[in-house]
Amino acid sequence: SQQGEEDPQALSIQEGENATMNCSYKTSINNLQWYRQNSGRGLVHLILIRSNEREKHSGRLRVTLDTSKKSSSLLITASRAADTASYFCATVHTNAGKSTFGDGTTLTVKP
Amino acid sequence: NAGVTQTPKFQVLKTGQSMTLQCAQDMNHNSMYWYRQDPGMGLRLIYYSASEGTTDKGEVPNGYNVSRLNKREFSLRLESAAPSQTSVYFCASSELDGLNIQYFGAGTRLSVL
């Protein structure tokens, strides 16, 4: 079964609002990553947070990680229409050398 | 700077036909991966190659074979295509550094009739 589970499955907001999506996982991880996928394209890496970190920022992105709850959240602030895409979390298992992807959150930002 | 290149971009097969999906990366990465993505779903790992000369099964390997031809190239073969293999296939590569940040190709859209 999938290690990462995102919610919500779909999110629709107005331009300028913040978007929050969540990811839960089941077993110990080395790190957790978020990827973005525009329609009809491959995934693009956005940000990585290691298991010993609690929060990470990159531009308008903020990622948190709670290893006790086995969950992570991705916050996109001041969203733009160009942020419309699907967002996936990926968990890297300790020593496994591979990632497991969740089913994704589809974000629509209305202009 | 090409990154990860997949060919073909689109393919239509009849049930029972065979084909090979090609993937090449120019980032000198050790690890390469093949995934499939079905509508509204995430990626499922078919096979991966942690380093040149090794391949391992992922979550959904049945019906597929792979070849790590050299450090740059990793191909995926469907010996006898089935309608259940209709999907979008993505190849990815990463450094063998424990972080596993993956770089993806643009995908191959495969329909099996």
Image (cartoon, rainbow, N blue to C red):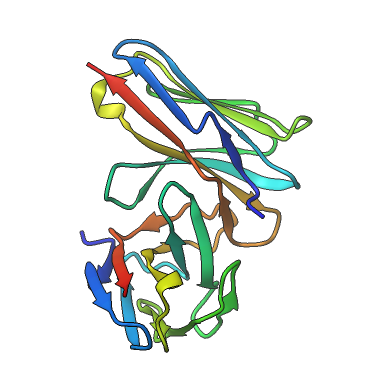
Residue at x 38% of width, y 80% of height:
B75
Examine the rendered structure and indicate whether residue A57 appears above or below residue B67. above
Outermost residue to the top: A16
In the picture, which quadrant includes the N terminus of chain B?
Answer: bottom left
Q: Position of residue A5 (x, y in %)?
A: 61, 40
Residue B25 can be seen in this image: no
Q: Nearer the viewer, residue A31 or B37?
A: B37
Residue B63 can be seen in this image: yes
Q: Nearer the viewer, residue A45 or B60?
A: B60
Q: Position of residue B2 (x, y in %)?
A: 22, 62
In this rendering, position of residue A74 left or right of residue A86: right
Residue at x 75% of width, y 46% of height:
A28
Q: Position of residue A103 (x, y in %)?
A: 52, 45
Q: Nearer the viewer, residue B2 or B19?
A: B19
In the picture, which quadrant includes the C terminus of chain B?
Answer: bottom left
Residue at x 36% of width, y 57% of height:
B104
